[in-house]
Image (cartoon, rainbow, N blue to C red):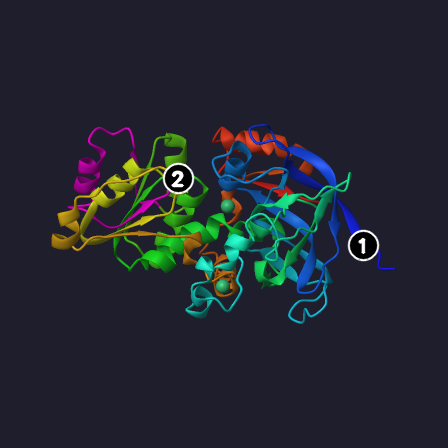
Amino acid sequence: MNETKYQRARAVLCRTVGQPVVVEEIDVELPRRGEVMIKMAACGVCHSDLSATNGTIPMPAPLVLGHEGSGVIVAVGEGVSEYAPGDHVLSSFVSMCGHCRYCQTGRPQLCDQAAKAAISLPDGSVRTRDLAGRPLNIFSGCGVMAEYATLHVDNVVKIGADVALDRACLIGCGVMTGVGAAMNTARVEPGSIAVVFGCGGVGLNAIQGCRIAGAAMIVAVDLSDAKLELARGFGATHVMNSATPDLVKALRKLTGGGADYAFECVGRGEIVAQAYGVLAKGGKAVVVGVAAPKDTTTVRTASLTFEEKTLTGSYFGSARPRQDFPRLLALYREKRLKLDELITRRYRIEEAPQAFADLAEGRNARGVIVFD
Ligand SMILES: [Zn+2]
Ligand SMILES: [Zn+2]
């Protein structure tokens, strides 16, 4: 007799693509070999979760949402020696196998295993089922918008127990993506000039990443004046509404002939071209926003050569989660990284549909679901 044990939990699900999320009781299996069960404390509501519910990011329903979670380990599976019950952890939506060519060259954000853990654990199976016993997919190997979650250790990062978990969770996606784009991907230099397109959750973090790296001029660009005002609080020294006529020309003028760095935090080819367009010679444009699959962009080819410009992408802020998550939390302790100010509103799990509606309406820098 080998009866499998499950933990009952409430979870936020996409039941039908195109429909509002639902809060449902599910069963979460106790950890198998190489896995841990986490009692979730908090989970940020990220634009990618919303994109999974409306089909922009194709993920098959039924899907347990959430990939920006924090919590405390309550059980460890066989063979797990680096974690113990009571450990505070963050989820990592990139799986880190440790032995593919990308992990071995210090680029776990590109790990090959992530593709296998897109809607399941890395082995292709799930530990989540509904009360009728039907399996439930999980967002990016996580599915942490739930009271309990069982994850493979390759998707888990241990953190110190001194940072409040409802703030620490934000490191797991939005903060890492934005700050990492500035600090890891672009390697912004002190005294430099940066322009950031898009001031949502990721853009604000690109702005504070530039600030932490010591950029002297940081120009925030967005259509919403309210977001531009918020951007000032995160370190923008200048703001410009994207509706400004001849935007690229105006930005080049404001920056005294072009920026050293530009960050595209929207995910649209035309804005990528603008980001590239505002660069000074030798400048670097970093695409952080996730564009639709068929979206394209255009650059003047000769400018790559004659002006030595760089156009590159940044996935998850080129994160090395096991090194970078603790570093970002250290910056938070030193009051150099803002987390509290990112949280517009906290929600109870039963308010999840409202949290998604607020995100869709652009009302939040970040909404966070806090579990009991
Ligand atoms: Zn995210
Ligand atoms: Zn790997």
| 342 magenta-colored | no
Query: Which of these two is toward me, 356 or 338?
Result: 356
Residue 104 position within the rendered picture, expressed as x and y whole percent measured from the top left: 45, 70
Q: Position of residue 200 (x, y in %)?
A: 43, 39
- Tell me which residue sits at (41%, 50%) in the image: 178
Is the Cβ of the residue at disc 2 closer than 8 Å to that at disc 1? no
**Magenta region includes residue 240:** yes
> Dot 1: what SS?
loop
Residue occupying the far left of the picture: 306
Q: In the image, is 96 to the left or to the right of 283? A: right
| Number of numbered labels in the structure image | 2
Q: Image height check: is 360 above or below 312?
A: above
The residue carrying pointer 1 sits among few (fewer than 14), some (14 to 19) or many (20 or more) residues within 10 Å by Cα, namely few
Image quarter in which the C terminus is found: top right
**Residue 331 vs residue 249, the one in the foreground:** 249
- Residue at figure coordinates x 41%, y 42% from the top left: 290
Residue on which the image places disc 2: 293
- What is the secondary structure assignment of the residue under circle 2? loop
Q: Position of residue 339 (x, y in %)?
A: 51, 49
Mark 1 — residue? 5
Task: Kindly indicate the quadrant of the structure image that contains residue 105.
Answer: bottom left
User: What label does residue 119 carry, if any?
Assistant: none
The magenta region covers: 236-265
Res 73 → quadrant: bottom right
